Image (cartoon, rainbow, N blue to C red):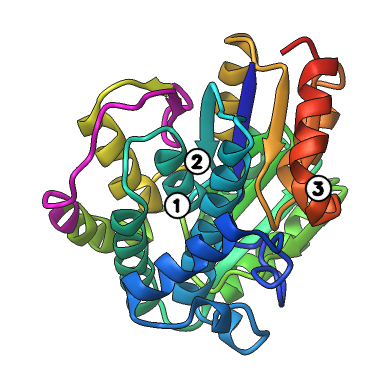
Amino acid sequence: MLAYQFPGQGAQSAGFLHRLPQHDVVNATLDEASQTLGIDVLTLDTSEALRSTVAVQVGLVVAGVAMVRLLADAQLTPDMSAGLSVGAYAAAVSCGALEFADALHMVRKRAELMEAAYPTGYGLAAISGLTERQLEMLAARQIQDGLPPVYIGNVNAPRQIVMAGSDAALDRLIERALAAGARKATRLAVSVPSHCELLADAAAKLIDYARDVPFRSPRGIYVGNRGGRPLHTAEAIRDDLATNMRHTVRWFDALTVMLEMGAQLVVEAPPGQVLTDIVREQWPQTTALALSSIAPDRWTATVRRRLVASGG
């Protein structure tokens, strides 16, 4: 079985949209996105543009859908799809639950709400080597010491956790985490405190917006962010996308479900490779592939070859 995974904010790098394959399907996807949003989406991946949460999130969805369409043009379609944070929008398009144009509008609204809520002074930090429970205890100590709260944003693996909060609180947490034995603790290229209660008001506004967005039941399997479980109805996917900014992303649970359901080849959309590294580290027997690490003109041939080799 073929599974797609779509990265979230933090995976972006300057020029990532320009590194997509030179192919008619990709060019048509870029043109559709530009016409839908009334901008040239190829201006969204400069170093300066990527300081904007809106540019990053829209660009990631465009890259993910371009991959889906390119592989579909070669008769390669996924059995299941999941996306981390904003990557969930590309996953919803991938499984047929959401039209590309509607995903673009909703993502732009989402990013605008997040950016307006916390224009500066907040973000994310990735901690490797400590468990969720250990980080909960460190976060509780910070509150006891009178510091602003920090929150568990993503559980990417049992000892690979992303924390959300203010810059000052995250910097102090990084010090505590390293002192407590973390292998690595670094800030991410994200300027908003994603996946925590700080975004409750923004999520409520996106829920209101999403009521008018048409969703359908998925053709393939869609695995959600909040619970890391398959979602089978239009309303469940609508809720997952509209609310995931304020809830912890249970990414490790989502990956576990996909593999338990029979995923044999897990393909990561550009521009990321972190999700592929998680699969390789946690499930070394599973074939995982990051297309950003492959020459663009070899995407379809490589996916087809790896799928055959994995028994799919």
For the stretch drawn in magenta, the main secondary structure is: loop
Magenta region: which residues? 208-229
Disc 2 residue type (three-letter):
Val
Q: Position of residue 305 (x, y in %)?
A: 83, 26
Left or right of 41? Residue 301 is: right
Q: Nearer the viewer, residue 150 or 138?
A: 150
Q: Is residue 211 magenta?
A: yes
> Dot 1: what SS?
loop
> Which residue is rendered at x = 82% and y = 26% of the image?
306
Label whose residue precedes the other's in the sequence (1 or 3): 3
Disc 3 residue type (three-letter):
Ala
Q: Position of residue 23 (x, y in %)?
A: 66, 59
Please tell me the numbered disc located at residue 249: 2
Residue at mark 1: 195
Q: Is residue 136 visible?
A: no
Q: CA distance from mark 1 to mark 3?
A: 24 Å
Residue at mark 3: 180
Label whose residue precedes the other's in the sequence (1 or 2): 1
Q: Nearer the viewer, residue 160 or 107?
A: 107
Q: Quarter of the image holding residue 24? A: bottom right
Q: Quarter of the image holding residue 234? A: top left
Q: Nearer the viewer, mark 1 or mark 3?
A: 1
Disc 1 residue type (three-letter):
His
Residues tagged 1 and 2 counted as in contact (Cβ below 8 A):
yes
- The N terminus - image quarter: top right
